[in-house]
Amino acid sequence: MPLTPETLTRHELNGLPVRVADAANADLVGIEGRVVAETQGTVSVASADRVRQVPKQGTTFEFALTDEPADLAKGSGTASKRGSETAGVRSGQSGPCEGVAYVTVDGARLLSRPELRTEKAGDSKWQ
């Protein structure tokens, strides 16, 4: 199954660029980097200087994927640029990357063991 905005929650997240768009803990908002590990309840994000564990519950993640068009409405979905205009400035970019869409996912949709969420057979609520 190809990695698309619609199938993101069924795929392995390791290696994907991610940014914390919103979180119950305001200190976590704005963390960005690559996913280096995932557990049932957390996502580990590696930036240039450290790795931070971010809880999935109560967090909204923004993954960089494709150039699929969509609107910028708040909530889950795909957008052609990041929800925050300053997001690229924090990471040293001059603006949104060309050919990249930012898929917003509520962390509650990712709450499960990664190997069960990504399985292709059997009785899984993610199929």
Image (cartoon, helix red, strand yellow):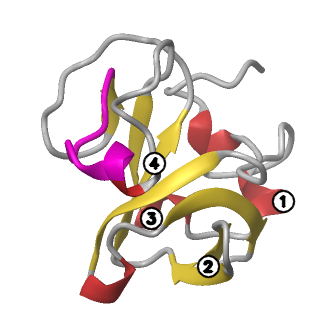
Ranked by sequence position, the earlier of labels 1 and 4 is: 4
Residue 38 vs residue 88, the one in the foreground: 88
* Amino acid type of the residue that numbered disc 4 sits on in the rendered structure: Gly
* Amino acid type of the residue that numbered disc 3 sits on in the rendered structure: Gly
Residue 10 vs residue 103, the one in the foreground: 103
- CA neighbours of label 4 inside 10 A, class few (<14), some (14 to 19), many (20+): few
Q: CA distance from mark 1 to mark 4?
A: 34 Å
Element under disc 4: loop
Q: Are marks 1 and 3 in contact (CB under 8 Å)?
A: no
At which x and y percent is residue 65?
Answer: 56, 29
Q: Are marks 3 and 4 in contact (CB under 8 Å)?
A: no
Q: CA distance from mark 1 to mark 3?
A: 16 Å
Q: Which residues are magenta?
A: 80-89
Q: Residue at x 43, y 67 (%)?
A: 108
* Amino acid type of the residue that numbered disc 2 sits on in the rendered structure: Thr
Is 98 a magenta residue?
Answer: no
Q: Residue at x 38, y 80 (%)?
A: 28
At which x and y percent is residue 56?
Answer: 49, 74
Residue 53 vs residue 2, the one in the foreground: 53
**Dot label at residue 115:** 1
Main SS of the magenta segment? loop
Give the residue pinned by disc 3: 107
**Dot label at residue 92:** 4
Q: CA distance from mark 3 to mark 4?
A: 26 Å
* Amino acid type of the residue that numbered disc 1 sits on in the rendered structure: Glu
> Closer to us: mark 3 or mark 4?
4
At which x and y percent is residue 46?
Answer: 69, 68
Give the residue pinned by disc 2: 42
Above-or-below relation of 59 to 53? above
